[in-house]
Image (tube, grey):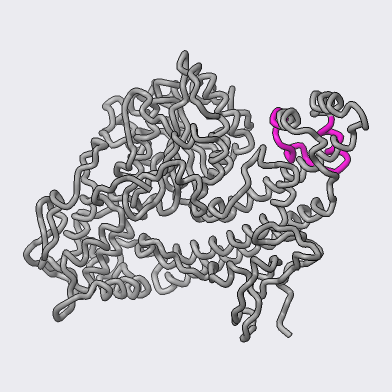
């Protein structure tokens, strides 16, 4: 008899973990022998051995485990530039998210559905769990939101328009893609593999003002950036946008991992519309950071005054006792203004801190999604108890009049529920939105509360969520231990610049990975080498600017013969990895000693660069012929052929 301690308890489960269907005499419960969750017959139609559970014969498993989703390797093309630790981290996050999906569908969604909780928060789909961390940018028009995105990506993106007037008139989600293209909002809102299905509730008027811009950028491999229309001020804010702007901001804020409020050093006033936008961020205060852009346009003394004025303005609209973190700098590609040139070091450190914060989102992504799930479960429970409390007070006659009276007295009714069920004040949806809910729906539409559903939510918070948190902790410890084991042979007190010449910066694990890639390119000759025509496609996949790839080729082609042998190719892949991690500016002008392969010390020769303007190698077209200048006005060339921009 195999161990069944990992099985979910039948008495705690009333709904299928795959489709949320309610179990009954005709809808039977079936345990998946792989993950242990309970499914209906339609969601567990397959059989296979489960050797990791000690089961060698074919047994019933759920559809997700049959497809082996948990053990699926990262398959996007950018993964060739990820370290093994990064790939393991992504896989562990994916496994945790599969558990979260089952938990939500089986135990939280049924109560949401019963009490129409989607009025407050859209129901979650698979894309919400599987998506990369999301960064939402908000600010008044012409504060530099689009310039900020272009600056940190180090390249243009489709749909990028920059100007002093309100140029961004739509929501643009900039995400990773193998090629540049634009996905229209109506198409994105029906794609189950994307986290934007919930936007369909805002209607066609909004979806016509929403699009996805896909770019092969290294930074986007770990996050999604959301550019928003500039918040209007003065007479402009009276204009009708045609859709619920504040509601759409609320939707993105619920799913964002980080919210950046951008301010211009010369535009510190907060318009009425911006105040309303900031107010919808209530409950997400831990996600909010502030960026003071164009800080180089004022001198040191003025910057001190600007910073103080900004904090005073924020204190009147951001109702938190903690001080919001403010990043100061000039986030665009132009040189610093002479007024702020004296603070160049400060601005550079602020930029590094901001980028470090954004890159860290991937490492804590699973933990933040668990945290959001806990908040959601508490709100669902509080909402259900409140509706049941109000419904029980309805008389036989005069129900509508009584409901209006209860709506007006809702704050006191919440207090009664808090005392009766030991619910915290923050576990109810917003008071004003709850009153709007009662104005929209009649209490008679809701049946009597089955308190078993509340018990299931309590079990989720008391047992299931802590179990997932323990799994996250175990995987983090294992990942950190692997990082320590990789460096056991190295002297922890020796700097890279002081490393002995015999030590190569590329370790054996990375070398083996790059060697496998090398031989997939069909090298020729003795010793085997790859030509520029063979190496270029895989280098272009990195999404780095062509100037950076040109420099990487120069540095890697140590013997200057226009080809890369096995060690030179490994060096090129490592430099691409470093460049994707730390930015294009991190590339050295000359190779440090520890970067030079032991087989290449003191090498030299003629130069032939496939990334030089107009240059070509072995049938590779010149960049001016094969690639086109992007219309966004940037000086750098586009690494990818033009596409139709259609989905």
Viewer-closest of 610 and 558: 610
Q: Is residue 215 above or below residue 149?
A: below
Count every numbered label the image shows and give the total: 0
Q: Please report the residue visible at 37 percent of the width from the left and 53 percent of the height from the top.
A: 177
Magenta run includes residue 417: yes
Quick one: quadrant of the N terminus? bottom right
Residue 36 in the image, given as x and y percentages of width and height:
68, 70
Residue 41 in the image, given as x and y percentages of width and height:
68, 68
Magenta run includes residue 209: no
Residue 325 shows in this picture: no
Q: Is residue 118 above or below residue 297?
A: below
Image quadrant in which you'd find residue 489: bottom left
Image quadrant in which you'd find residue 561: bottom left
Q: Is residue 97 left or right of residue 207?
A: right
Highlighted range, magenta: 413-433
Residue at far top of view? 235
Majority secondary structure of the magenta segment?
A: helix
Q: Please report the residue visible at 35 percent of the width from the left and 49 percent of the height from the top.
A: 215
């Amino acid at each position: 008899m195999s161990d069944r301690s990992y099985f979910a308890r039948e008495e705690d489960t009333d709904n299928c973990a795959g489709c949320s269907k309610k179990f009954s005499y005709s809808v039977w419960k079936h345990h998946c022998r792989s993950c242990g969750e309970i499914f209906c017959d339609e969601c567990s139609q397959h059989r296979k051995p489960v050797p990791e559970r000690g089961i060698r014969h074919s047994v019933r498993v759920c559809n997700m485990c049959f497809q082996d989703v948990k053990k699926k390797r990262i398959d996007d093309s950018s993964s060739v530039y990820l370290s093994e630790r990064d790939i393991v981290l992504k896989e562990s996050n994916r496994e945790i998210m599969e558990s979260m999906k089952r938990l939500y569908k089986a135990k939280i969604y049924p109560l949401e559905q019963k009490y129409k909780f989607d009025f407050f928060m859209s129901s979650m789909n698979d894309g919400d769990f599987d998506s990369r961390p999301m960064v939402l940018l908000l600010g008044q028009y012409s504060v530099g939101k689009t310039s900020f995105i272009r600056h940190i990506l180090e390249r243009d993106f489709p749909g990028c328009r920059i100007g002093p007037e309100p140029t961004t008139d739509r929501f643009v989600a900039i995400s990773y893609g193998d090629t540049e293209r634009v996905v229209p909002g109506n198409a994105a809102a029906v794609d189950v593999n994307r986290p934007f299905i919930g936007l369909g509730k805002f209607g066609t008027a909004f979806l016509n003002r929403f699009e996805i811009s896909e770019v092969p950028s290294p930074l986007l491999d770990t996050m999604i950036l959301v550019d928003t229309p500039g918040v209007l001020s003065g007479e402009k804010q009276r204009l009708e946008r045609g859709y619920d702007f504040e509601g759409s901001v609320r939707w993105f804020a619920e799913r964002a991992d980080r919210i950046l409020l951008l301010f211009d050093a010369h535009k510190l006033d907060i318009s009425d519309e911006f105040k309303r936008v900031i107010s919808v961020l209530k409950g997400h205060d831990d996600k909010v950071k502030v960026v003071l852009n164009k800080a180089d346009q004022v001198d040191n003394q003025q910057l001190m005054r600007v910073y103080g004025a900004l904090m005073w303005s924020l204190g009147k609209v951001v109702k938190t006792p903690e001080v919001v973190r403010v990043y100061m700098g000039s986030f665009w590609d132009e040189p610093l203004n002479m007024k702020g040139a004296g603070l160049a070091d400060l601005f550079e450190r602020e930029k590094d801190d901001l980028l470090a914060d954004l890159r860290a989102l991937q490492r804590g992504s699973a933990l933040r999604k668990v945290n959001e799930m806990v908040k959601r479960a508490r709100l669902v429970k509080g909402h259900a108890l409140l509706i049941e409390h109000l419904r029980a007070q309805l008389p036989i006659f005069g129900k509508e009049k009584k409901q209006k009276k209860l709506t007006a007295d809702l704050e006191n009714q919440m207090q009664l529920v808090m005392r009766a069920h030991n619910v915290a004040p923050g576990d109810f949806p917003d008071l004003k939105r709850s009153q709007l809910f009662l104005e929209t729906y009649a209490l008679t539409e809701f049946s009597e509360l089955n308190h078993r559903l509340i018990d299931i939510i309590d079990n989720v918070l008391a047992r299931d969520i802590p179990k997932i948190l323990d799994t996250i902790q175990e995987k983090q410890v294992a990942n950190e231990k692997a990082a320590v084991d990789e460096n056991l042979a190295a002297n922890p007190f020796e700097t890279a610049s002081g490393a002995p010449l015999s030590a190569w910066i590329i370790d054996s694990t990375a070398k083996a990975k790059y060697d496998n890639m090398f031989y997939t390119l069909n090298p020729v000759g003795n010793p085997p080498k790859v030509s520029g025509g063979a190496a270029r496609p895989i280098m272009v996949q990195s999404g780095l600017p062509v100037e950076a790839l040109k420099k990487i080729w120069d540095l890697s082609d140590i013997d200057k013969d226009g080809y890369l042998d096995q060690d030179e190719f490994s060096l090129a892949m490592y430099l691409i990895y470093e460049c994707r991690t730390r930015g294009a500016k991190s590339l050295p002008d000359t190779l440090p000693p520890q970067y030079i392969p032991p087989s290449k010390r003191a090498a030299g020769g003629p130069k032939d660069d496939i990334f030089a303007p107009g240059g070509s190698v072995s049938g590779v077209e010149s960049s001016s012929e094969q690639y086109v200048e992007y219309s966004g006005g940037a000086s750098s060339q586009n690494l990818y052929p033009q596409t139709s921009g259609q989905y």
